[in-house]
């Protein structure tokens, strides 16, 4: 499912609607599906792991993007991850380019309608901003375990990051079919590849044909470092200096 922003949103950077729209694009679009399945349990996932993905929306090069999920910290209050999104298809170029979102999730976010404890966003080299978790327009992002009833079996799959033994799941939705290959060897989310194939004639944002979406692992490692290193300012209009 691809997130979209109403055209009536004001274009000014820093506007309340722009932040909400940008977060929706960051949190929904890279996942290729509305509620990303998790095969790795955060309670036992290795802190410091990261995974890079290429995301292609349709066939146009300008719709491509790169994402990184990094697992930075685990404590009794929750799990801290950073999501970095870059590339022409990220749909955030107008507000400054590459965007990093640091999120603190509940200790066990599976199935929660509001799993976020904290959200901080940094656009390009701008000052990080703490986003209210109850900001109107934020996506109601949920994390879920894969449905065992939708598992097709175990397959060997080769992607840019290498060859993996992965569980293959298929979810048939009203407008598309989503195939996901998941491995508990790929922290922090367990995703090796996701392909969303639209149903013929399915309409996407603005009534245009719904595009295919592919999310594929390109690299992974265990030496993640935070990209947001400066203190975040409170949400609201930036004060003039």
Image (spheres, rainbow, N blue to C red):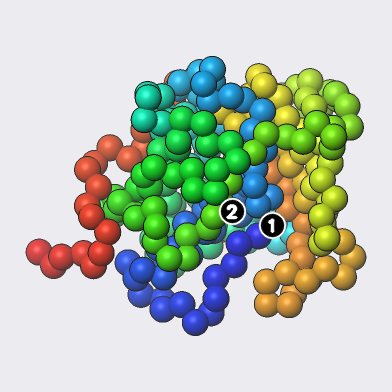
Report the front residue among 54 and 13. Answer: 13
Residue 29, image x, y percentages = 61, 54
Number of labels in the image equals 2
The image quadrant that residue 204 belongs to is bottom right
* Mark carried by residue 180: none
- Which tag, 2 or 1, sits closer to the chain's start? 1
Determine if residue 122 is in view.
no
Q: Which residue is mark 2?
A: 28
Residue drawn at x 39%, y 61% is 135
Report the front residue among 95 and 139. Answer: 139
Residue 158, image x, y percentages = 79, 28
Q: Residues within 10 Å of mark 2 (few under 14, many from 20)?
A: many
Q: Residues within 10 Å of mark 1 (few under 14, many from 20)?
A: many
- In the rendered view, does 239 fall on the left or right side of 194? left
- Residue closest to the far left: 241
Residue drawn at x 22%, y 52% is 233
* Label 2–label 1 contact, CB within 8 A: yes
Determine if residue 28 is in view.
yes
- In the rendered view, does 20 fall on the left or right side of 176? left
Q: Which residue is mark 1?
A: 1
- Circle 2: element type: helix
Residue 31, image x, y percentages = 63, 47
Q: Is residue 193 above or below residue 59?
A: above
- Residue closest to the far bottom: 8
- In the rendered view, does 22 fall on the left or right side of 238? right
Residue 106, image x, y percentages = 45, 36
Q: Is residue 167 above or below residue 239?
A: above
Residue drawn at x 49%, y 48% is 114
- Circle 1: element type: loop
CA gap between label 2 and label 1 equals 7 Å
- In the rendered view, does 104 fall on the left or right side of 45? left
Q: Quadrant of the N terminus?
A: bottom right
């Amino acid at each position: 499912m691809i997130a979209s922003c109403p055209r009536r949103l004001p274009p000014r950077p820093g506007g309340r609607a722009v932040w909400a729209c940008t977060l929706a694009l960051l949190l929904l679009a890279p996942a290729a599906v509305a509620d990303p399945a998790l095969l790795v349990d955060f309670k036992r996932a290795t802190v410091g792991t990261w995974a890079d993905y290429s995301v292609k929306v349709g066939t146009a090069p300008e719709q491509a993007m790169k994402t990184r999920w990094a697992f930075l910290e685990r404590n009794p209050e929750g799990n801290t991850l950073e999501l970095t999104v870059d590339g022409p298809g990220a749909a955030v170029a107008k507000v400054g380019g590459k965007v990093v979102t640091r999120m603190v999730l509940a200790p066990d976010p599976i199935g929660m309608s509001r799993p976020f404890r904290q959200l901080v966003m940094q656009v390009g080299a701008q000052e990080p901003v703490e986003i209210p978790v109850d900001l109107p327009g934020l996506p109601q992002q949920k994390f879920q375990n894969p449905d065992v009833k939708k598992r097709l079996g175990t397959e060997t799959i080769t992607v840019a990051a290498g060859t993996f033994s992965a569980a293959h799941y298929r979810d048939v939705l009203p407008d598309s079919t989503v195939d996901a290959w998941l491995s508990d060897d790929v922290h922090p989310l367990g995703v090796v590849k996701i392909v969303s194939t639209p149903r013929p004639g399915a309409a996407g944002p603005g009534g245009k044909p719904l595009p295919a979406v592919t999310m594929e692992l390109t690299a992974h490692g265990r030496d993640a470092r935070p990209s947001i290193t400066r203190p975040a300012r409170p949400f609201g209009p930036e004060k003039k200096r």
